[in-house]
Image (cartoon, rainbow, N blue to C red):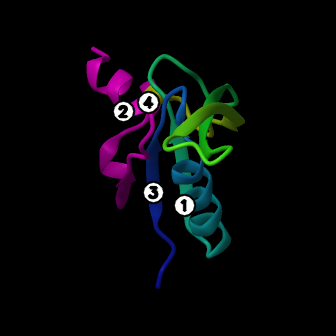
Amino acid sequence: MAPKKILMIVGDFVEDYEAMVPFQALTMVGHTVDTVSPDKKAKETVATAIHEEENNEQTYSEKRGHAFTLTATFSSIKSKDYDALILPGGRAPEHLRLNK
């Protein structure tokens, strides 16, 4: 498969594994993945969130994960330049949906 250009839109407290794993896997097989967040610039970061079950509890706790570095500036991207879009989950999609 020819390398593709993929856009990933993230925000603070994006689900860690839903952002990190696709980014690393797609990059590893030769695709270009641009990560962006509204109102942030390339080389800035968003915080990820990690959910884990602890102490036999019936639900999970949420902890701060990694600093996920953005590779592009949101205001300078053009959707026509991309072959695919990834919108990872977590708390970020709610914020992104409300961003005007």
Q: Crowding near pointer 4: few (<14 within 10 Å), some, many (20+)?
A: many
Find residue 56 and report its horizontal and vertical position in percent.
62, 48
Task: Give the mark nearer the N terminus: 1 vs 2.
Answer: 1
Which residues are the magenta region? 75-100
How many marks on residues?
4
Residue 18 seen in the figure: yes
Disc 3 to disc 2, C-alpha distance: 18 Å
**Where, quadrant-wise, is the C terminus in this rendering?**
top left
Disc 3 to disc 1, C-alpha distance: 11 Å
Q: Are marks 1 and 4 in contact (CB under 8 Å)?
A: no
Disc 4 to disc 3, C-alpha distance: 19 Å
Q: Give the secondary structure at mark 3.
A: strand
What's the mark number on residue 22?
Answer: 1
Disc 1 to disc 2, C-alpha distance: 17 Å
Q: Crowding near pointer 3: few (<14 within 10 Å), some, many (20+)?
A: many
User: What residue is pinned by disc 2?
Assistant: 93
Q: Are marks 2 and 4 in contact (CB under 8 Å)?
A: yes
Closer to us: 70 or 77: 70
Find residue 17 and report its horizontal and vertical position in percent.
58, 52
Left or right: 59, with 87 as reference point: right
Which-is-in-front pick, marks 3 and 2? 2
Left or right: 64, with 82 as reference point: right
User: What residue is pinned by disc 3?
Assistant: 6
Amino acid tagged 4 = Ala
**Residue in the picture at 60% in, 60% down:** 21
Closer to us: 55 or 91: 55
User: What residue is pinned by disc 4?
Assistant: 92
Task: Give the mark nearer the N terminus: 3 vs 2.
Answer: 3
